[in-house]
């Protein structure tokens, strides 16, 4: 008996729980209908239904194929109003298309019957009233049957005159072979632009997302630790290294202007620079060390690397000048490959822009690496008191530098123009916070700097991924103008954030065995990535990249609505102009390209991955 009671109670509780769940769902979805303003009365509105039918019929007839059209005009005389006395109407010429008006004279705003004979079967057109002023007034439309006959009733306009006026019917018929419309040609041009817009964005995004993905992979960054003094000196060295790299690139660039005036001198200097860059670098970076290098040998190697870097920068500047000159020659002398010449010129200009950026990054990284090694050396060689003092000093200076740079960025954005608020106060606060951190962390302890870089990189990528390309393209359109270039930049930025996340998650899921095996041989971090990580991630990286190209093709149709070029820009124009037949042609083109991209990417993934 008690078992029965227990079962009944359980059943009642379940029923009540189910009823409560249904009630909660009803409340949630009821409120959702209210928030989203679901209005079923609008769907039953005759006006809405008529507009929907009109749009659907227009979309079902895409403006892709057209014929040359031949136009026929047939006139019939009419008097408005009727004259005094008896009216004798002329007999129409029945050898071709003709019309009979009943009656052949009438008062304004009177209905008359218009009947046509011998017209082209299954054709249509407007029926127009032609007054003496020859201002056309459309009264309706006609549609002929299989025999070329039509009959309509129209109302005469309020245009009385003593002169003879006319009722005119204009019909059109297709002649010749079909051909593509101007809409189809414009759609083809824009869909090609869309595909290459997505290709460039995917290429740029992939090139930058690959190195970033290693910094956002937790399994690679969690073991990166360093003493606080080493981190502090590295932070202090980065701005100085960047400034040195920029200054050196400017000085070498000035020398390039002299050497690039003569073509032979340019080519000779380019090869000499490559030799000077290669030989010292080969000597300064041996593949293996037989014995531990002395301090003097290390200094000599640093000097050789510096000379090699100068020669490399010089060679890059000379190469950019040579590429620009080659592109200009192709564009001017060979018109059939003008686009190729322009592309080569752009590559040279991009290289010239990147040289300064590369020099700044290399300078910052090199000086930061040297400063970090110096910090580790000081941390092991100095006495305890000196080590603690320098640790506190360097950490405070690093904190002040970071906060001062942040304040400078805020000042640039918001134009505060008050150094006490954007420089001194941030630097002071940063120094105090860093000094406190240095007191809490022992100088012998290591700090997980890898995880700090990991979380910062992830946060930046999450922020970029949260901003839709439709918003990004508005900013870039202001910078580079409305067009596909703005779309390329917007999609590239979003591609970097999206692919870096996918790539890093793939790195985090690699097998740990090869990583541990390569690390056990004494390989450094770069060698570990090259020999243990990259072989495991190449196939999924290729797959993700192809999929991203597919996504960029679809997204490029949307960013066109905000001025990002491509097929979306044309589609938006036609929708705004209510030209739904042209919009239908563009939607069909988008669907074909997306389906083709999906098929192509699946085939390539099958063969490559």
Image (cartoon, rainbow, N blue to C red):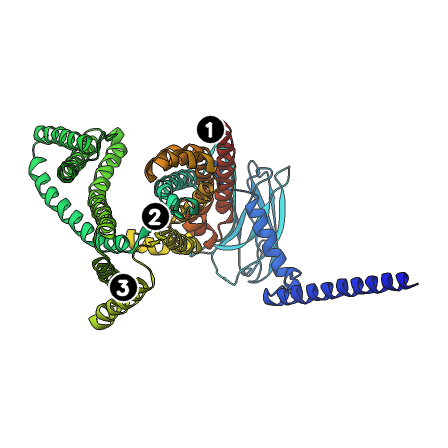
Crowd rating for badge 3 (residues with CA inside 10 Å; few <14, some 14–19, many 20+): many
- Residue at left offset 63%, top offset 48%: 151
The answer to which image quadrant residue 293 occupies is top left
- Measured in 3D between alpha carbons, the distance from the residue under mark 1 to the one under mark 3, in whole angstroms, is 48 Å
Q: Is residue 241 above or below residue 343?
A: below
Q: Position of residue 424 (x, y in %)?
A: 21, 70
Q: Is residue 583 left or right of residue 440?
A: right
| First in sequence: mark 1 vs mark 3 | 3
Residue at (36, 33) in percent of width and height:
521
Residue 119 versus residue 268 in the image, above or below: below
In primary-sequence order, the first of circles 2 and 1 is: 2
Foreground residue, 6 or 244?
Answer: 6
Q: CA distance from mark 3 to mark 2?
A: 30 Å
Kindly identify which numbered label has been placed on residue 403: 3
Q: Which residue is mark 1?
A: 608
Residue placed under numbered mark 2 in the picture: 489
Q: Earlier in the sequence, mark 3 or mark 2?
A: 3
Q: Nearer the viewer, residue 454 or 515?
A: 515
Question: In the rendered image, is residue 69 in sight?
Answer: no
Residue 443 percent across, percent down from the top left: 29, 57
Task: Determine whether, in the image, residue 103 is placed left or right of residue 344.
Answer: right
Q: Secondary structure at mark 3?
A: helix
The reply to whether callout 1 and callout 3 are in contact (CB within 8 Å) is: no
Name the image quarter holding residue 362: top left
């Amino acid at each position: 008996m008690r078992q029965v009671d227990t079962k009944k109670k359980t059943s009642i509780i379940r029923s009540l729980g189910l009823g409560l769940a249904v009630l909660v769902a009803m409340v949630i979805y009821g409120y959702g209908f209210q928030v989203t303003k679901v209005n079923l009365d609008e769907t039953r509105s005759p006006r809405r239904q008529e507009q929907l039918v009109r749009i659907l019929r227009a979309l079902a007839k895409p403006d892709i194929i057209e014929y040359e059209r031949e136009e026929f005009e047939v006139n019939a005389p009419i008097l408005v109003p009727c004259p005094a006395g008896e009216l004798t109407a002329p007999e129409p010429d029945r050898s071709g298309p003709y019309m009979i008006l009943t009656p052949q004279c009438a008062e304004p705003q009177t209905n008359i019957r218009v009947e046509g004979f011998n017209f082209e079967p299954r054709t249509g057109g407007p029926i127009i009233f032609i007054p003496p002023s020859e201002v056309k007034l459309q009264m309706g439309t006609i549609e002929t049957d299989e025999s070329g006959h039509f009959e309509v009733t129209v109302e005469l306009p309020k245009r009385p005159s003593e002169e003879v006026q006319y009722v005119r019917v204009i019909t059109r018929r297709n002649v010749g072979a079909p051909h593509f419309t101007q809409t189809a040609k414009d759609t083809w041009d824009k869909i090609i632009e869309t595909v290459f817009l997505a290709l460039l964005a995917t290429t740029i995004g992939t090139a930058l997302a690959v190195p970033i993905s290693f910094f956002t992979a937790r399994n690679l960054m969690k073991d990166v630790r360093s003493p606080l003094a080493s981190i502090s000196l590295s932070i202090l060295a980065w701005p100085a290294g960047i400034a040195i790299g920029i200054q050196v690139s400017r000085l070498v660039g000035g020398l390039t202007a002299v050497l690039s005036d003569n073509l032979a001198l340019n080519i000779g200097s380019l090869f000499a620079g490559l030799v000077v860059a290669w030989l010292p670098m080969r000597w300064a970076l041996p593949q293996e060390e037989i014995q531990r290098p002395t301090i003097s040998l290390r200094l000599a190697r640093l000097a050789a690397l510096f000379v090699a870097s100068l020669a490399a920068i010089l060679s890059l500047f000379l190469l950019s000048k040579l590429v620009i000159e080659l592109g200009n020659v192709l564009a001017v002398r060979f018109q059939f490959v003008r686009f190729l010449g322009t592309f080569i010129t752009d590559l040279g200009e991009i290289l010239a822009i990147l040289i300064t950026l590369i020099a700044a990054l290399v300078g910052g990284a090199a000086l930061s690496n040297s400063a970090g090694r110096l910090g580790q050396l000081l941390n092991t060689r100095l006495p305890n008191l000196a080590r603690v003092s320098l640790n506190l000093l360097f950490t405070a200076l690093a904190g002040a530098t970071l906060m001062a740079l942040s304040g400078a960025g805020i000042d640039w954005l918001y134009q505060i123009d008050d150094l006490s608020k954007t420089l001194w106060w941030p630097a002071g606060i940063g120094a105090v916070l860093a000094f406190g951190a240095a007191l809490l962390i022992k100088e012998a302890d290591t700090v997980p700097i890898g995880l700090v870089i990991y979380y910062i990189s992830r946060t930046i990528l999450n922020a970029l991924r949260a901003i839709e390309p439709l918003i990004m393209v508005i900013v870039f359109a202001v910078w580079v103008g409305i067009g596909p270039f703005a779309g390329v930049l917007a999609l590239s930025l979003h591609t970097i954030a999206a692919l870096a996340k996918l790539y890093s998650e793939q790195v985090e899921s690699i097998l740990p065995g090869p990583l541990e095996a390569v690390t056990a041989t004494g390989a450094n971090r770069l060698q570990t990535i090259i020999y243990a990580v990259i072989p495991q991630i190449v196939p999924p990286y290729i797959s993700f990249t192809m999929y991203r190209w597919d996504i960029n093709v679809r997204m490029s149709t949307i960013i066109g609505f905000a001025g990002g070029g491509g097929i979306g820009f044309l589609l938006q124009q036609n929708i705004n102009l209510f030209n739904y037949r042209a919009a239908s042609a563009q939607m069909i083109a988008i669907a074909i390209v997306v389906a083709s991209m999906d098929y192509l990417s699946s085939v390539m993934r099958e063969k490559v991955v």
